[in-house]
Amino acid sequence: GAVVSQHPSWVICKSGTSVKIECRSLDFQATTMFWYRQFPKQSLMLMATSNEGSKATYEQGVEKDKFLINHASLTLSTLTVTSAHPEDSSFYICSAHPRVSGSVVYNEQFFGPGTRLTVL
Amino acid sequence: EDQVTQSPEALRLQEGESSSLNCSYTVSGLRGLFWYRQDPGKGPEFLFTLYSAGEEKEKERLKATLTKKESFLHITAPKPEDSATYLCAVRGGGAQKLVFGQGTRLTINP
Protein backbone atom coordinates (compact mmCIF):
# COMPACT_ATOMS: atom_id res chain seq x y z
CA GLY A 1 0.00 0.00 0.00
CA ALA A 2 0.78 3.74 -0.01
CA VAL A 3 2.05 3.87 -3.60
CA VAL A 4 2.69 7.21 -5.29
CA SER A 5 3.43 7.50 -9.00
CA GLN A 6 4.86 10.34 -11.07
CA HIS A 7 4.70 10.94 -14.78
CA PRO A 8 6.85 11.41 -16.71
CA SER A 9 9.90 9.87 -15.07
CA TRP A 10 12.13 12.08 -17.17
CA VAL A 11 11.63 14.91 -19.64
CA ILE A 12 13.88 17.00 -21.86
CA CYS A 13 12.55 20.27 -23.18
CA LYS A 14 13.71 23.43 -24.92
CA SER A 15 14.18 26.67 -23.03
CA GLY A 16 10.97 28.72 -22.93
CA THR A 17 8.55 25.80 -23.05
CA SER A 18 6.28 24.63 -20.25
CA VAL A 19 6.38 21.19 -18.69
CA LYS A 20 3.67 19.45 -16.66
CA ILE A 21 4.47 16.75 -14.08
CA GLU A 22 1.73 14.56 -12.61
CA CYS A 23 1.69 13.02 -9.15
CA ARG A 24 -0.88 10.36 -8.30
CA SER A 25 -1.64 8.42 -5.14
CA LEU A 26 -2.60 4.98 -6.45
CA ASP A 27 -4.13 3.18 -3.47
CA PHE A 28 -5.13 5.92 -1.07
CA GLN A 29 -6.64 9.37 -0.99
CA ALA A 30 -4.32 12.24 -0.16
CA THR A 31 -5.57 15.35 1.56
CA THR A 32 -2.18 16.96 1.12
CA MET A 33 0.55 16.60 -1.46
CA PHE A 34 3.98 18.16 -1.41
CA TRP A 35 6.41 19.11 -4.17
CA TYR A 36 10.17 19.02 -3.67
CA ARG A 37 13.19 19.60 -5.84
CA GLN A 38 16.55 18.01 -5.28
CA PHE A 39 19.95 18.96 -6.65
CA PRO A 40 22.76 16.40 -6.94
CA LYS A 41 24.09 15.21 -3.60
CA GLN A 42 21.76 17.53 -1.70
CA SER A 43 18.73 16.92 0.43
CA LEU A 44 15.14 17.58 -0.50
CA MET A 45 14.01 21.19 -0.77
CA LEU A 46 10.29 21.74 -0.21
CA MET A 47 8.76 23.93 -2.88
CA ALA A 48 5.09 23.95 -1.98
CA THR A 49 2.29 22.28 -0.06
CA SER A 50 -0.87 21.47 -1.95
CA ASN A 51 -4.24 20.80 -0.31
CA GLU A 52 -7.07 19.37 -2.40
CA GLY A 53 -9.46 22.05 -3.56
CA SER A 54 -7.45 25.00 -2.31
CA LYS A 55 -4.50 27.10 -3.43
CA ALA A 56 -1.01 25.79 -2.84
CA THR A 57 1.21 27.27 -0.16
CA TYR A 58 4.66 28.09 -1.53
CA GLU A 59 7.89 28.17 0.42
CA GLN A 60 9.83 31.38 0.63
CA GLY A 61 11.80 32.06 -2.53
CA VAL A 62 9.72 29.81 -4.78
CA GLU A 63 8.04 31.70 -7.63
CA LYS A 64 4.37 30.77 -7.66
CA ASP A 65 3.87 32.10 -11.19
CA LYS A 66 6.68 29.91 -12.46
CA PHE A 67 5.77 26.71 -10.64
CA LEU A 68 2.01 26.26 -10.99
CA ILE A 69 0.44 23.64 -8.76
CA ASN A 70 -3.04 22.20 -9.18
CA HIS A 71 -4.49 19.66 -6.72
CA ALA A 72 -7.71 18.86 -8.53
CA SER A 73 -8.67 15.66 -6.72
CA LEU A 74 -7.73 13.55 -3.72
CA THR A 75 -5.47 11.41 -5.89
CA LEU A 76 -3.89 13.86 -8.34
CA SER A 77 -1.65 16.90 -8.12
CA THR A 78 0.20 18.53 -11.00
CA LEU A 79 3.24 20.78 -11.14
CA THR A 80 3.71 22.91 -14.24
CA VAL A 81 7.06 24.55 -14.80
CA THR A 82 6.26 27.53 -17.00
CA SER A 83 8.76 29.05 -19.42
CA ALA A 84 11.44 26.64 -18.27
CA HIS A 85 15.09 27.66 -18.36
CA PRO A 86 18.28 25.62 -17.88
CA GLU A 87 18.47 26.64 -14.21
CA ASP A 88 15.15 24.84 -13.66
CA SER A 89 16.81 21.55 -14.54
CA SER A 90 16.53 19.37 -11.46
CA PHE A 91 14.98 16.26 -9.92
CA TYR A 92 11.37 16.96 -8.90
CA ILE A 93 9.74 14.68 -6.33
CA CYS A 94 6.20 14.68 -5.00
CA SER A 95 4.89 13.15 -1.81
CA ALA A 96 1.41 12.46 -0.50
CA HIS A 97 -0.03 12.50 2.99
CA PRO A 98 -2.88 9.98 3.33
CA ARG A 99 -6.31 11.09 4.37
CA VAL A 100 -7.44 9.91 7.77
CA SER A 101 -9.05 6.50 7.22
CA GLY A 102 -11.37 5.32 9.99
CA SER A 103 -9.38 5.36 13.21
CA VAL A 104 -6.00 5.38 11.43
CA VAL A 105 -4.11 8.66 11.44
CA TYR A 106 -1.08 8.94 9.20
CA ASN A 107 1.79 11.25 9.95
CA GLU A 108 4.03 9.85 7.22
CA GLN A 109 4.49 11.18 3.72
CA PHE A 110 4.93 8.69 0.89
CA PHE A 111 7.09 9.71 -2.02
CA GLY A 112 6.87 9.26 -5.75
CA PRO A 113 9.81 8.00 -7.82
CA GLY A 114 10.73 11.49 -9.03
CA THR A 115 10.91 13.27 -12.39
CA ARG A 116 14.22 14.29 -13.93
CA LEU A 117 13.77 17.59 -15.85
CA THR A 118 16.46 18.74 -18.24
CA VAL A 119 16.02 22.10 -19.97
CA LEU A 120 18.23 22.70 -22.98
CA GLU B 1 12.40 26.90 14.03
CA ASP B 2 12.52 23.13 13.61
CA GLN B 3 15.97 21.81 12.67
CA VAL B 4 17.51 18.44 11.80
CA THR B 5 21.22 17.66 11.61
CA GLN B 6 22.53 14.32 10.42
CA SER B 7 26.00 12.87 10.92
CA PRO B 8 28.21 11.70 9.48
CA GLU B 9 27.71 13.17 6.02
CA ALA B 10 29.15 10.01 4.47
CA LEU B 11 30.07 6.62 5.88
CA ARG B 12 31.94 3.80 4.24
CA LEU B 13 31.80 0.33 5.85
CA GLN B 14 32.90 -3.17 5.03
CA GLU B 15 30.20 -5.77 4.59
CA GLY B 16 29.26 -7.10 8.02
CA GLU B 17 30.65 -4.07 9.87
CA SER B 18 27.87 -2.69 12.09
CA SER B 19 27.51 1.04 12.76
CA SER B 20 25.06 3.82 13.60
CA LEU B 21 23.83 6.97 11.89
CA ASN B 22 22.88 9.99 13.98
CA CYS B 23 20.01 12.45 13.62
CA SER B 24 19.91 15.38 16.05
CA TYR B 25 16.78 17.48 16.09
CA THR B 26 15.06 20.43 17.67
CA VAL B 27 11.31 20.66 17.19
CA SER B 28 8.34 22.26 18.82
CA GLY B 29 5.86 19.53 19.70
CA LEU B 30 7.15 16.42 17.96
CA ARG B 31 4.49 14.71 15.86
CA GLY B 32 6.86 12.18 14.42
CA LEU B 33 10.49 11.52 13.49
CA PHE B 34 10.85 9.72 10.19
CA TRP B 35 13.60 7.73 8.54
CA TYR B 36 13.72 7.30 4.78
CA ARG B 37 16.09 5.52 2.45
CA GLN B 38 16.89 7.07 -0.94
CA ASP B 39 18.65 5.31 -3.79
CA PRO B 40 20.31 7.39 -6.55
CA GLY B 41 17.77 8.76 -9.03
CA LYS B 42 14.77 7.59 -7.00
CA GLY B 43 12.32 9.02 -4.51
CA PRO B 44 12.73 8.40 -0.78
CA GLU B 45 11.37 5.12 0.56
CA PHE B 46 9.69 5.19 3.95
CA LEU B 47 11.38 3.14 6.69
CA PHE B 48 10.21 4.12 10.18
CA THR B 49 8.19 6.57 12.24
CA LEU B 50 9.07 7.20 15.89
CA TYR B 51 6.90 9.27 18.20
CA SER B 52 8.28 9.28 21.72
CA ALA B 53 11.56 8.93 23.59
CA GLY B 54 12.47 5.33 24.25
CA GLU B 55 10.63 4.02 21.24
CA GLU B 56 12.43 1.54 18.97
CA LYS B 57 11.51 -0.01 15.63
CA GLU B 58 13.22 -2.71 13.60
CA LYS B 59 13.20 -3.89 10.04
CA GLU B 60 15.63 -6.54 8.86
CA ARG B 61 19.14 -5.20 9.57
CA LEU B 62 17.92 -1.74 10.60
CA LYS B 63 16.85 -0.51 14.02
CA ALA B 64 15.77 3.04 14.78
CA THR B 65 15.78 4.51 18.28
CA LEU B 66 14.65 7.84 19.67
CA THR B 67 15.59 10.11 22.57
CA LYS B 68 14.35 13.61 23.32
CA LYS B 69 17.15 15.16 21.28
CA GLU B 70 18.29 12.59 18.74
CA SER B 71 17.58 9.44 16.84
CA PHE B 72 19.92 6.68 15.79
CA LEU B 73 19.65 4.32 12.87
CA HIS B 74 21.63 1.21 13.76
CA ILE B 75 22.73 -1.04 10.93
CA THR B 76 23.71 -4.55 11.93
CA ALA B 77 25.89 -6.71 9.67
CA PRO B 78 25.17 -4.58 6.60
CA LYS B 79 25.22 -5.88 3.04
CA PRO B 80 26.16 -4.01 -0.16
CA GLU B 81 22.45 -3.60 -0.99
CA ASP B 82 22.10 -1.42 2.12
CA SER B 83 24.15 1.24 0.33
CA ALA B 84 21.97 4.34 -0.03
CA THR B 85 21.40 7.81 1.40
CA TYR B 86 19.46 7.71 4.65
CA LEU B 87 17.30 10.74 5.39
CA CYS B 88 15.90 11.81 8.75
CA ALA B 89 12.95 14.21 9.04
CA VAL B 90 10.70 15.62 11.76
CA ARG B 91 7.15 16.91 11.81
CA GLY B 92 6.39 19.53 14.43
CA GLY B 93 3.13 20.39 16.12
CA GLY B 94 0.69 22.21 13.86
CA ALA B 95 2.82 21.75 10.76
CA GLN B 96 1.98 19.70 7.71
CA LYS B 97 5.45 19.72 6.25
CA LEU B 98 8.50 17.67 7.13
CA VAL B 99 11.88 19.20 7.93
CA PHE B 100 14.68 17.08 6.49
CA GLY B 101 18.30 16.66 7.44
CA GLN B 102 21.02 16.65 4.80
CA GLY B 103 21.25 12.86 4.82
CA THR B 104 23.99 10.31 5.40
CA ARG B 105 25.43 8.66 2.32
CA LEU B 106 26.19 5.05 3.30
CA THR B 107 28.42 2.80 1.21
CA ILE B 108 28.89 -0.88 2.07
CA ASN B 109 31.88 -2.48 0.38
CA PRO B 110 31.77 -6.23 -0.34
Image: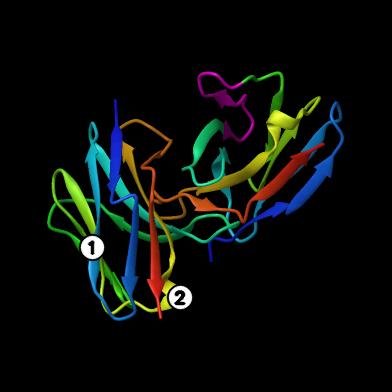
The residue singled out by tag 1 in the image is: B20
Instruction: Left or right? Give the position of B48 relative to A24.
Output: left
Taking the magenta stretch, the answer to whether it contains residue A58 is: yes
Numbered mark located on residue A83 in the image: none
What secondary structure is the magenta-colored segment mainly? loop
Examine the rendering and report whether any part of residue A38 can be seen: yes
Quadrant showing the C terminus of chain B? bottom left
Examine the rendering and report whether any part of residue A35 can be seen: no
Q: Residues within 10 Å of mark 1 (few under 14, many from 20)?
A: some
The residue singled out by tag 2 in the image is: B81
Q: Which colour scheme is used?
A: rainbow
Secondary structure under the numbered disc 1 in the rendered image = strand
User: Which corner quadrant of the image does residue B93 belong to?
Assistant: top left
Amino acid at dot 1: Ser
Residue A28, horizontal then vertical, whole percent: 58, 56
User: Which corner quadrant of the image does residue A62 belong to?
Assistant: top right
Please state the extent of the stretch shown in magenta in the rendering: A50-62
| Chain where mark 2 sits | B
Amino acid at dot 2: Glu
Q: How crowded is mark 2: few (under 14 residues within 10 Å), some or many (20 or more)?
A: few
User: Which corner quadrant of the image does residue B48 belong to?
Assistant: bottom left
Residue B107, horizontal then vertical, whole percent: 40, 66
Identified at 34% across, 65% down, the residue is B12
The numbered mark, 1 or 2, whose residue comes first in the sequence reads: 1
Alpha-carbon span between mark 1 and mark 2:
17 Å
Taking the magenta stretch, the answer to whether it contains residue A55 is: yes
Residue A120, horizontal then vertical, whole percent: 82, 36
Instruction: Left or right? Give the position of B97 relative to A115.
Output: left
Count the labels in the image: 2
Task: Compare residues B25 and A94 and report the one nearer the observer.
Answer: B25
Residue A38, horizontal then vertical, whole percent: 56, 41
Task: Compare residues B107 and B50 and report the one nearer the observer.
Answer: B107
